Amino acid sequence: MTEKYILKCPDCGRRIPDRYTNVCPEGCTGLIRAYYQKTHLQIQNYLGVFRFSDWLPIEGNLPSDAGPVTYKSETFAKELGLSNLYISFSGYWPERGAHIESCSFKELEALPTTVRMREKGNGILQISSAGNTGRAFCQVSALTGAPVVVVVPESSVDRLWTTAPTKNVCLITVEGDYTDSIEFGNTVCTIPDIVAEGGARNVARRDGMGTVMLDGAITAGRLPDSYFQAVGSGTGGIAAWEAAMRLIGDGRFGAILPRLHLAQNEPFAPMTNAWKDGRREIIPDKDMPDASRTVNQVYSNVLTNRHPPYSVRGGVYDALSATGGTMDSITNAQAAEAEQHFVDAEDIDIDPAASVCVASLIKAVEADAVGKDDCILLNITGGGYKRVAEDKNQYPVEPSFRVKGGAPIDEIRRDIESWANTHARRNYA
Ligand SMILES: *Cc1c(COP(=O)(O)O)cnc(C)c1O
Ligand SMILES: [Zn+2]
């Protein structure tokens, strides 16, 4: 092959050239995956996520120093009695070289996804998000001028801010819950040239998030024995598994896949329930009863995805099976306590989802589910919100349109089309 990468369907095996393709043209349901020509990872001379561009589905890059930063923990590791604990931090913490100003690992996907759309799609990205993903894409839009349409529930609009002014964000707020805003987002994508970002199906999203595993293995000099992450969709877990397979193919980092330790937040833990019951299928009545209530009772609501890519080929179930992985669920009290412990030890504020992850590590240590000398990679998926507020201006993103849940798009279709035509299309760097 002469291309830098090719996409391949895990169901039918078809090789697919990338046209911002997120699903197999044969109609298969599995997650298509990127295969890179280079099996030997060469770190490029950039500060941020683009230093891993050998294994990102893009040709160019962006001037950004936002990337994952991994370091060997001293204080927290000592308190847990661990000799090889590596913390990968995706957020804002300049003292450690961490410059993700939107403060979560969603920016690791927003950066390559924006480049991939420019190179292979030539459309306008649409994102439905209750928080961190939307903010990450607004931040990248502020940086690059790339147009984005972001659809959020009205109640989460105050989570959307950037550290530079935005000119090319079309923010639509939906009166209703997250599901209403996803549905409205889907109808927005019926407008020509507006293209859904794709979620877990987007290879740039997964390979962007997978850079945490790359950075962890490079910092530790080997693949970790265990990888800890809190999950809502599980995309980060799938990404870690895929990145680890590439690292095994590289040959310098060992030959054993890290065991995935994924955690959800009680009382909403559908993947944990299905996995513990030995099932590839999530049964809603059994695994997430009363979901509309329980999603509002968790410490971290970025972990409350109701349709995670768990059962599909190449999804969370396969990632757990391949790595000998486990799933745990964490109570709000355990998360809050773990957060305090971590913040005191490492001296940086963290996202509630990361606190869930820290709690799952503490539980695993107490249960002897990991060895004291194991090489452990702890994915702190977000943090530095307090730290970034000290250093940067924060600009709220103002809604362009407000709609009611379930409303037809007809009333504002022309307005969005004209926004797309005159305001933003194809006129960015
Ligand atoms: C989205 C998110 C997660 C969960 O990520 P998935 O792998 O997509 O389930 C965890 N932590 C933070 C901070 C997030 O924003
Ligand atoms: Zn296929």
Image (cartoon, grey):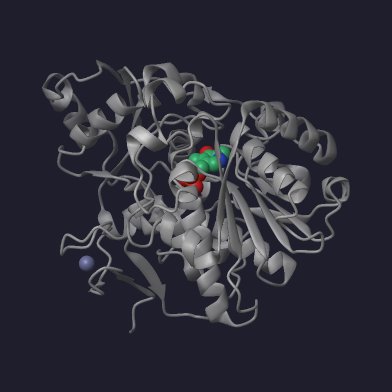
**419 shown above or below 202:** above
Q: Quadrant of residue 427?
A: top left
Q: Residue at 36% x, 50% y: name it.
A: 309
Residue in the foreground of this view, choosing between 329 and 313: 329
**Above or below 106: residue 409:** above
Q: Quick check: can you spot residue 62?
A: no
Quarter in which the N terminus is drawn? bottom left
Q: Is residue 212 left or right of residue 2?
A: right
**Quadrant of res 21:** bottom left
Q: Quadrant of residue 250?
A: bottom right
Indicate whether 20 appears above or below 349: below
Instruction: Name which residue lies at 24% across and 57% down.
Output: 29
Residue at 55%, 68% (x, y): give it.
244
**How far across and how far down the image is residue 331, in percent?**
62, 30
- Seen in the image, is 330 located left or right of residue 111? right
Which residue is nearer to you in this view: 188 or 181?
181
**Residue 274 visible here:** yes
At horizontal 76% and vertical 36% (from top left) the residue drawn is 348
